[in-house]
Image: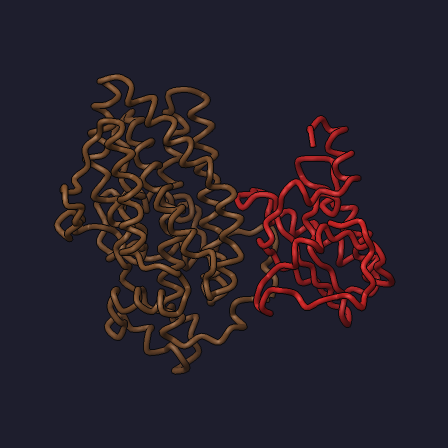
Chain colours: A brown, B red
Amino acid sequence: MAATEIELTPDQRLALETELRTLADDEFVIAERYTEWQVHAPTLESDLALANIAQDELGHARLWYDLLEELGYDETDLLWERDPDTFRHATLSELPFPEGEWADAIVRSYLFDVAEGLRLEALEDSAYPAIADRVGKIQREEGYHTEHAENWLERLATDDEGGDHLQAAVDRLFPHALALFVPAEPVPFGAETVSGDGAGSQYTDADALPDAATVEETIVSEGYRSDSLATLGERWLDRVVPTLESHGLRTPVPADGEITDELVPDACGRNGNHTDDWDTLYADFTHTYRELGREDATMIMDRPE
Amino acid sequence: MTSETQPETDATPCGYTEYREGPAIDDLPATGVGATGVDAAVWDALYAVEDPEMPVSIVDLGLIYDVGVDDGLARVDMTLTYSGCPARDMLQNDVREAIQAVDGVEDVDINLVWSPEWSVELVTEAGKENLRDFGLSV
């Protein structure tokens, strides 16, 4: 049964959309970056591994975007003609890889996939059935991502040069990984998804939206996600910090384990502020669409009514 | 799936809420056995649709979760082996065309479901034979 048949209050819908946008955008954008490795990976094996991981993440992005489509959007609204400022992925996904830095791909994948695993666990019993129904499928396809990253972490950490490259990647990426746990600023409802001045029409105006913390509270209180991002962030730190330290890597987390806002970059993505590299990436992945003068995403078949 | 045939009177309500997408795993694979009339014709049409990569019917591959025809509207619940399947649109198109050709069907409604998630356990014995002939070890 389509999710649209569930009656949602505007606040419920806003909470759902916000959660879905972060899930979908994280996956889509990191996949766009991973695919860059298909011409640069150090071995054919690595090339295949990252290409596969990228394909998985694109598949997962599609599963989440599907649910936004059930709320009235289409692929054009969600990707090809979307205002780049309304993407809500954490900046970890969008940063370019420094040339040839395989260690960056490994550290990034490790930080991202551990976070994703924890996030999915918190969605297993989502009160929004269509979310819960997708989690098992995604988890089944995710297991090897973390395994792949951990395996490479271990290999790279065995010599000094590899360790230096890993450390540089941790220094660069860790703050942007913390962004994964920042509550996202909500995005106004698309005018095309709301009928006239009916329910939700007030939220087509950005100024009328509640703040990120309020929306995050709704996501948890409605049971769309069982744990807060703050709780997930603590679990993530408990897992990644000891692992990185076991490989001789330092993190910016102070000895008392206290994460302060100063550790998170101003441009963290979730708040709508992105790095300049995002503009370039957005221009790249929408290039063909614009060059061909498209007005909608081309489908083999018409979408069912 | 148990080999015992359960009398229909033993049917119990689905454990999921009405909003959950998929059937219970014990009811899968759905193969259309026992279907009659237009339903049976729809199943026959689905048997003729092959996976784009392997010579096996999508029914024997276990992708079809439920079929029902009601007043000319054929509804199909189906899944895909892989979330990133590049043939998603193509496969749905094949299914739609196959079913639309069935006498007594006017419209087709395809519902992609992801739970229970597909696994090789859902491949029928006939499907496993096809896959073995193709060179896969299942």
Expressed as whole percent of the image width and height from the top left, the position of residue A143 reads: 46, 39
- Which residue is located at x 43 percent, y 26 percent? A47
Q: Which residue is farthest bottom?
A: A197
- Which residue is located at x 47 percent, y 48 percent? A60
State the residue in front, A217 or B77.
A217
- Which residue is located at x 58 percent, y 59 percent? A303
Quadrant in which residue A186 is drawn: bottom left
Residue A286 visible in this rendered orientation of the protein: no
Task: Give the position of the N terminus of chain A as an image quadrant.
Answer: bottom right
Whether A160 is drawn above or below A290: the answer is: above
Q: Is residue B55 left or right of residue A135?
A: right
- For the image, the number of numbered tags is 0
State the residue in front, B23 or B44.
B23
Q: Is residue A252 left or right of residue A1?
A: left
Whether A98 is drawn above or below A191: the answer is: above
- Which residue is located at x 31 percent, y 26 percent? A102
Expressed as whole percent of the image width and height from the top left, the position of residue B11 reads: 75, 66
Quadrant in which residue B138 is drawn: top right
Expressed as whole percent of the image width and height from the top left, the position of residue B8 reads: 81, 65
Residue A88 visible in this rendered orientation of the protein: yes
Whether B59 is drawn above or below B20: the answer is: above
Task: Give the position of the C terminus of chain A as an image quadrant.
Answer: bottom right
Whether B100 is drawn above or below A45: the answer is: below
Q: Is residue B114 left or right of residue A211?
A: right
Expressed as whole percent of the image width and height from the top left, the position of residue A211 reads: 24, 68
Q: Is residue A14 left or right of residue B106?
A: left
